[in-house]
Amino acid sequence: MMLPTIDIALRGATVALLLVLAASLFRGFGTVIAGRLAATFALGSAAHAVSYSIGATSPVSHAPVLALSTGNVVVFWLFTRALFDETFRLRWWHALVWAAVAAFSFVNCIWIAPASGARLSIIAINLITLGFIALAVTQTVASWSSDLVERRRSVRVFIVSAAALYGGLNAVLQIAMSGSGGAEIANTVNLAVLTAVVAAICYAMMRVDGADLFPAAPEVQAEASEAAVVESGADQKLVDALMRLMDDERIYRHDNVTIGTLASKLGIPEYRLRRLINQRLGYRNFNVFLNEHRIAEAKAALADPSQAEVPVITIAMDAGFQSLGPFNRAFKAITGVTPTEYRRLKATAA
């Protein structure tokens, strides 16, 4: 009797925390993609807290809530992308991916599980979960080093790691204990871990400025950039030296340019260069900083009549891009048109 009572109390506390967190995120960051996705993820996590049970399939009546819970792993993946890539935009096919996963979960609960047995059903759902968690963790690892906002680097890695760790362990437990009759203790322990993770995330978010965690809206970023460009002594000398590396030596053309590469050239620690580019130049992401210089060079080449016959891919690679796809996306994000359209517009204007 004690374990079911504890389960109900933990579920209630977790759902309450997640609903408050979702409301706070929607109110404070509803205009930012990462903020909206974070709030949606909190709501999906509430559905997860209500619906899941280790070692057994859920009843048919829980199918809609379970579908939302399973689809939430797609939201988690999109959230990590938006959090770590400020140029990320939601696409129509992202909604299709979410709908496909949620629909599979619904069909699985209604028809597949009753027909094929609980174990196969649980394994299928949780393998999907592990796949999207792996994508999210890969995104975290790949883009963490390019983040220039110091407090955001540590806090958001904690949030993503905690959620990914819980989700991964939960999926493994579900697979390992599917069909087991003695999962009550595992359920209670799992709920306690979930409650602790949610409480820790809420506590972490209360201790950091939300503007540090979530990418600011464009107009806010512009204001912050203008305020950040402050001429002061040694820092200004470092800014001048950095600009010489970018404008005169065109170091952005080199392969695999990193914060460490530039810091070594300037003879300063990496953390100081991150702070310099962020606080003095107003950039929040190192790749955006590099790409603006690369795109500036590409724009000049595309507008040059003497280079009218030079292929776009050649111009892109000369500017430091490794392939055409990333160049096209970065170019359009900055200029609003494709490189070919930009060249045509400049030729027409001339």
Image (cartoon, rainbow, N blue to C red):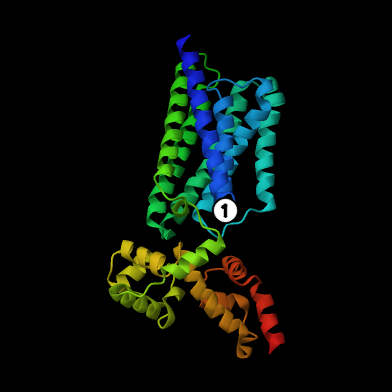
Is there any visible trace of residue 320 in the rendered image? no
* Label 1 Cα crowd, 10 Å radius (few <14 / some 14-19 / many 20+): some
Q: Residue at x 62, y 26 (%)?
A: 121
Where disc 1 sits, the SS reads loop
* Left or right, residue 250 beside residue 133: left
Relative depth, front residue between 251 and 273:
273
Report the residue at 49% width, 14% height from top: 5
Depth check, front residue: 197 or 189 = 197
Above or below residue 77? Residue 233 is below
Observer able to see residue 190: yes
Tag 1: residue type? Answer: Val
- Residue 216 against residue 191 in the figure, above or below: below
Q: How many marks?
A: 1
| Apparent side of residue 206 relative to residue 19 in the rendered image (left or right) | left
Circle 1 sits on which residue?
Answer: 32
Residue 331 x %, y %: 59, 71
Position of residue 87 measured from the top left corner of the image (x, y, whole percent): 56, 60
Q: Give the image location of residue 79, x and y in percent.
A: 55, 47
Residue at x 36%, y 70% (from the top left corner) = 262
Image quadrant holding the C terminus, namely bottom right
Q: Residue 73's spot in the image, x, y percent?
A: 57, 39
Left or right position of 134 against 108: left
Left or right for 115, reference 184: right
Does residue 59 sit above or below 83 in this rendering? above
Who is closer to the viewer here, 304 or 235?
A: 235
